[in-house]
Image (cartoon, helix red, strand yellow):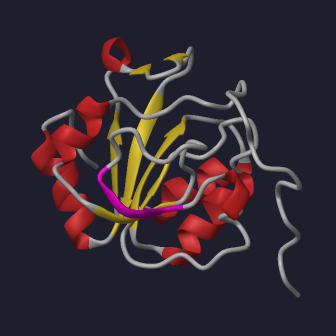
Amino acid sequence: MTQPRLFTTPQDGSTSDDYWTPKWIFDALGVEFDLDVACPPNGPAHTPCKAFYTQEDDALTADWYGAVWMNPPFSKPNDWVYKFIKHANGICLLPYSKSKWFNHLWSQLDGILALPRERAAFVQGDIFMPCFLGAFGVANVEALHRSRIGRVR
C-alpha cells in the first residue's frame, strides 16, 4: 500500500511551519547532503545539498536516497520521523517532545546533539522550544562531533 499524498496543492508562500535552518548550523556541520527532504518552496537558500524535495514533491511518497537533511514541519513530524528512521542515513533537526515518535527516534539515533537555546534562531523566526540534531550513520555522527556545537551522545 502506498502512502497517500501529504499535500494536495503546492506551497506558494510561508506557513506557520516554515522555520528554516540557519546557515551557521550547516557551516558547523561541514557536510554536503545528497537530499534535503523538506525544502522551502523556492529551493535551498543555503542548505548544502545536491537535490531537494519541496512540498510539491511530497517527500513522504518519494524515494529518499543517500545522506539526507531533514527539518520537517514541526506541527506533524510523526510520518517524517518514521521515514527518517527507516532510511537511517542523515541528520535531522527536531524539537524535543513528549510524543511517541520522539521516544522511538531518541532510542534509535546513532548520535544526538542538543542545540544551544541562545543560538536556535531560525531563518523565519525563533522557535520557542528546545531543539536537537539527530544523526544516523558514522559520517553523520562524526559531523556532529566536528561541529563543536555541543556535546554529542
Q: Residue at x 60, y 46 (%)?
A: 72
Query: Residue 105 location in percent, x, y?
Result: 55, 58
Query: Residue 116 location in percent, x, y?
Result: 31, 22
Q: Is residue 40 left or right of residue 14?
A: left
Query: Residue 33 location in percent, x, y?
Result: 32, 62
Residue farthest bottom in this picture? 1
Q: Residue at x 28, y 49 (%)?
A: 153
In magenta, the rendered stretch is: 48-52
Q: Residue 34, relative to residue 103: is it above or below?
A: below
Chief secondary structure of the magenta portion: strand
Q: Is residue 51 magenta?
A: yes
Q: Is residue 124 magenta?
A: no
Residue 137 figure quarter: bottom left
Q: Residue at x 83, y 54 (%)?
A: 7
Depth order, front residue of 41/116: 41
Residue 45 figure quarter: top left
Quarter the N terminus occupies: bottom right
Query: Residue 125 location in percent, x, y?
Result: 52, 15
Residue 139 figure quarter: bottom left
Q: Is residue 152 left or right of residue 56?
A: left
Task: Give the mark count.
Answer: 0
Q: Is any part of residue 126 visible from this angle? A: no
Q: Residue 99, relative to residue 48: is it above or below?
A: above
Q: Is residue 65 left or right of residue 86?
A: left
Q: Is any part of residue 100 visible from this angle? A: yes
Q: Residue 89, relative to residue 10: is it above or below?
A: below
